[in-house]
Amino acid sequence: MLNRRMVLVVATATLSLGAAAQAPVSLKEAYRNDFLIGAAINAPQIRGQDNRGDAIIDAQFDTISPDNALKWERIHPQPGVYNFTLADKYVAFGEKRHMFIVGHCLVWNNQVPAWVFRDRKGNLVDRKTLLKRMHDHIFTVVGRYKGRIQSWDVVNEALNDDGTLRQTPWLKIIGPDYIEKAFEFAHQADPQAQLTYNDYSLELPAKRKGAVALVEKLKAEGIPITSVGMQSHDHLDWPSDAAVDATISAFAKTGVKVVISELDIDVLPHATQNQGADVSLKIAQNPKLNPYVNGLPPAMQKQLAERYAGLFQVFLKHRDVVTRVTLWGVTDADSWLNDWPVVGRTSYPLLFDHAGQPKPAFQAVIQAAAEGKQ
Ligand code: G3I
């Protein structure tokens, strides 16, 4: 009952826009002529075990990303052993709903099993061996979903905040051209698929510079890169709208499209100076870092709504370049930010609250679309 009622609330929501205008009732409808709008979905949602979440996905989004279902450790846990059970369900979920389906992610330094980089004795493998493993993984996974997954995050988080290449086993063993190789393999496996370089904190000037240089290098070499994914794990106070604007412009100049690939806005106190999304970061629990266990106060809801509206205005300004905006989760209850970088916090980064109800930020995002078209 609750699920049906909630959908009804969202589906019948109208906003006062002055005059007689009526706002569209869903995110995908509001942005239909601008860019796709989506969410990362989790295992219960893929399996149909979260009716509340699935109703929101059905009503609001026209593209999906898998939060974990396609990561190397999940689908390729041991040499030669693939487990596509959940990944197949994920793709079927999107196809049933005629959605734009994103694959996340092929080459990353996290959530990749240790065996990938080691031989039977435990020593690091050589370049040739690791390239073959990368090739086989990409061909198997991208090949399986050829023509069905429309866009792949090919390389994820290859850069440090200072714009240099992150010291990962991929870089150490293969060398810097591991990035080119990953894109080439993905393109060979599905020539029609869109291919993305995906990273966080790209608004940091040094990181942005490094990313622009990387994209320019790939383009100069004829590597088939379609877009840069700005993850956009944002905060109320960072990055500024102007920095987001400048970053999208900088990537647009290189000739690639931009996707906002993992949007959320953290309202909780900063646990560190670091703005990023490095999943290895862990900070001890402390009540001061978890101030809203009983709900987000109205003043904070308002700040969050204004922040979302500002960002969407920037995305709309770049609607010729921004092809997709994906939120990293469906409701606040699903967000990774309940457990990062401090485990067990109550977080409020998305557009639907812990009970699955639309927040003021949802209304603000719908309103931003209407205002952007006036
Ligand atoms: O599945 C296990 C479950 O069996 C166990 O009981 C539970 C206890 O902790 O853990 C569950 O696994 C967790 C998994 O999410 C599923 O919820 C992992 O501990 C947790 O580390 C994992 O976090 C994921 C994180 O990537 C890890 O890298 C988040 O869900 C996922 O949203 C997040 O996504 C990343 C993007 O891929 C790349 N960019 C940053 C973004 C946010 O961190």
Image (spheres, grey):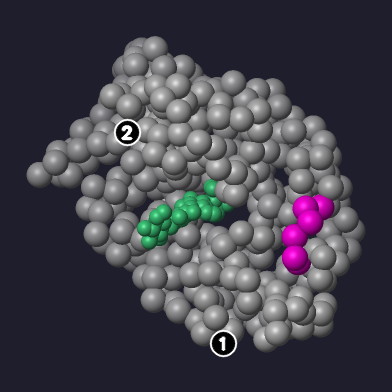
Decide: is 44 above or below 232: below
Q: Is residue 130 above or below residue 17?
A: below
Label 1: how many Cα within 10 Å (few below 14, some 14–19, many 20+) = few
Label 2 SS: loop
- The disc placed on residue 353 is 2
Amino acid at pointer 1: Gly
Please state the horizontal and vertical placement of residue 88, each as a whole percent of the image.
41, 74
Q: Position of residue 25 (x, y in %)?
A: 32, 34
Answer with mark 1 or mark 2, whichever residue precedes in sequence.
1
What residue did someone put label 1 on?
80
Q: Is residue 371 visible?
A: no
The CA distance from mark 1 to mark 2 is 41 Å
Q: Position of residue 251 (x, y in %)?
A: 76, 42
Q: Residue at x 61, y 59 (%)?
A: 110
- When the figure is inspected, residue 364 is found, relative to residue 316, above or below; the finding is above
354 left or right of 187?
left
Answer few, some or many: residues within 10 Å of disc 2's Cα (few below 14, many 20 plus, some between 14 and 19): many
Q: Position of residue 318 (x, y in %)?
A: 65, 35
- Looking at the rendering, the stretch of residues picked out in magenta corresponds to 165-170
Give the residue drawn at x 30%, y 45%.
56
Q: Does any portion of residue 276 appear in the rendered image?
A: yes
Would the CB of label 1 be found within 8 Å of ligand 1?
no
**Dot 1: element:** loop
- Indicate the amino acid at tag 2: Asp
Dot label at residue 321 = none
Q: Residue at x 53, y 77 (%)?
A: 76
Residue sitting nearer the eye, 38 or 290: 290
